[in-house]
Image (spheres, grey):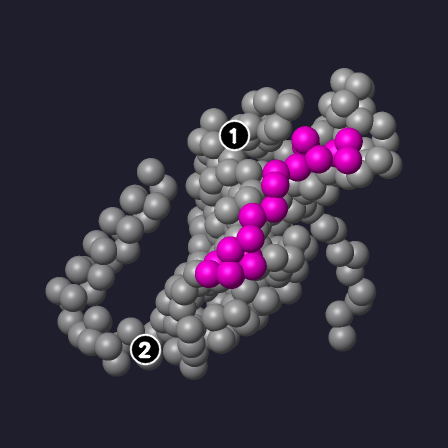
Amino acid sequence: MLPPQQIHYESPKIQPNDILDIKVSALITETALPYNRPVITNTNVSNLELIKLQGYLVSTEGTIVYPVLGKLAVADQSTAQLETELQQLLEKGGHLVQPNVSVRLLNAKVTVLGEVKNPGTYSFTEQQISLPQALGYAGDLTINGERNNIMLIREENGERTVTNIDLTETDWFNSPYYYIKPNDFIVVNPNGPKVKSAGFIGNTGTLISVASLILTSLVLITK
């Protein structure tokens, strides 16, 4: 039995193309109205999609246009940091007295591909989900999935990293890859028997072709 381990939560950073839900309240409700977008009702749109339409889309420059305050740089901040910044801007700028600000990410998603039962892109509304949870959304690995070679592709701060995770070990529990970040890609590679049964490896020629394909993929990923 493994000894108890401390869990370290790390809020994901806001990125371009994120959609933010920002709500502001104050002691006098009416004074906060100019700082909130009007509520749009449409019975033909699902609740989540309707909320997204009313959210703030982060531009490719990492900014949003906020009522009264204008253009704000929000990229590379956590939602908690943005809440604090907006509270200070509203209070110190003389806009509101003791405002409360709530910021949530509306379009967090993870893509799971390869040897899983239901590959695809999955949205989540929790602040954080773990790698096992993300695999659970996709129905878990199939019997042909290679559990000791899970590829996780992450784009953060303008850089792309590719990491291989061995689910049969425990060292990744305290790594930066235990918790999924929005827009992560998870690829479950096929195991040896699956590759052979698919006819990918039958002779030296096909082996060289597969190696060449893998090398080309890695070059494209790391560009």
Q: Secondary structure at mark 2?
A: helix
Amino acid of disc 1: Gly
Q: Position of residue 8 (x, y in %)?
A: 74, 51
Residue at 77% x, 35% y: name it.
Answer: 30
Residue at 47% x, 32% y: name it.
Answer: 59
Amino acid of disc 2: Lys
Residue 62, label in figure = 1
Residue 194, label in figure = 2
Residue 223, label in figure = none
Which segment did they paint magenta? 30-48
Q: Is residue 211 above or below residue 77?
A: below
Q: CA distance from mark 1 to mark 2?
A: 43 Å
Quarter of the rendering occupied by the N terminus = bottom right
Most foreground residue, 43 or 112:
43
Q: Position of residue 107 (x, y in %)?
A: 53, 51
Residue at 64% x, 64% y: name it.
Answer: 170
